[in-house]
Amino acid sequence: MNAIEEFYRVAFARYGDLEWWPADDPFEVAIGAILTQNTSWKNVERAIERLKCDGLLSPNTISDVPMEKLAEAIRPSGYYNQKAKKLKAFVEWFREELDCDFSAGDTMPTAHLRESLMSVKGIGPETADDILLYAFEKPVFVVDAYTYRIAVRHGWSPPDVGYDELAEIFTSSLDEDVFLYKNFHAILVEIGKTFCTKKAPKCVNCPMKPTLRNGTPLVIV
């Protein structure tokens, strides 16, 4: 068992299935993945609730609604004018490429689908992988600030690691399994928020301390 597998074994014993991503359907997942850029999940929940209350959480309504009204609905997520444009761009892609049907992506190679998603203005690697993993249920590993911080502190990767390189470190160390990738990512986020914080990490009380080399982070990033 390698270090990353051991980390997940210990983490799963503590956290179990975190049942992430909270959403009613894959389309809501995709919208949430765009809205969560540069904001907290609490703000995303508020924005999604407003979309639901305004009857705007569907491809057709997002496509048809005036930009200003869409931006106002998602105001709680921050950068709402930019994100309104991103939502409309995603919906246009979703209609043209998949006829608004997530199951149409089932037979598409993951690499092709990822490249196509990233051609949408405002969708970068992390957002694309969020959508691929949680909406399309494709076996990709999502890299975010929490993933990076924990990986570097545990010595799984160097501080100058790139996004795709770090994702490869995880996928090459784990079985290819959508549930595993989803839950591991969710656990990393939870640990990153509560223990492996950006400043003054709480290693003494962290349940993952036994998996640290020598019991202390190798690098504070």
Image (cartoon, grey):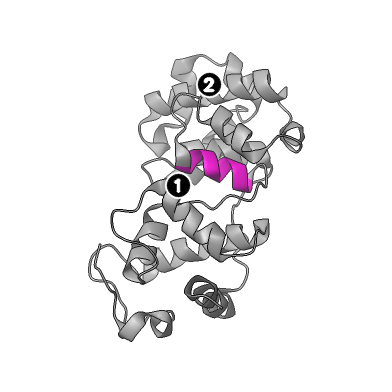
Quarter of the image holding residue 174? bottom right
Amino acid type, mark 1: Asp
Task: Give the camera-side residue of 39 and 142.
Answer: 142
Helix, strand or loop: magenta stretch: helix
Task: Give the camera-side residue of 108 and 201.
Answer: 108
- The relative height of residue 12 versus residue 62 in the rendered view (above or below) is below
Q: Mark 1 points at which residue?
A: 164
Q: State the separation of the CA atoms marked 1 and 2.
A: 27 Å
Q: Is mark 2 on a helix, strand or loop?
A: helix
Q: Residue at x 51, y 60 (%)?
A: 170
- Crowd tier of the residue under label 2, counting other residues whose Cα lies within 10 Å: few below 14, some 14–19, many 20 or above: many
Q: Where is residue 136 in the image (x, y as percent from the top left)?
A: 67, 42
- The relative height of residue 147 versus residue 9 in the rendered view (above or below) is above
Q: Which residue is drawn at 53% across and 21% down?
A: 88
User: Residue 108 has which mark?
Assistant: none
- Crowd tier of the residue under label 1, counting other residues whose Cα lies within 10 Å: few below 14, some 14–19, many 20 or above: few
Which quadrant does the N terminus fall into? bottom right
Q: Position of residue 77 (x, y in %)?
A: 41, 38
- The relative height of residue 44 versus residue 61 in the rendered view (above or below) is below
Q: Is residue 215 one of those drawn in magenta?
A: no
Q: Earlier in the sequence, mark 1 or mark 2?
A: 2
Amino acid type, mark 2: Lys
User: Residue 88 has which mark?
Assistant: 2
- The relative height of residue 17 versus residue 178 in the rendered view (above or below) is below
Quarter of the image holding residue 214? bottom left
The part of the chain drawn in magenta is 126-134
Q: Is mark 1 on a helix, strand or loop?
A: helix
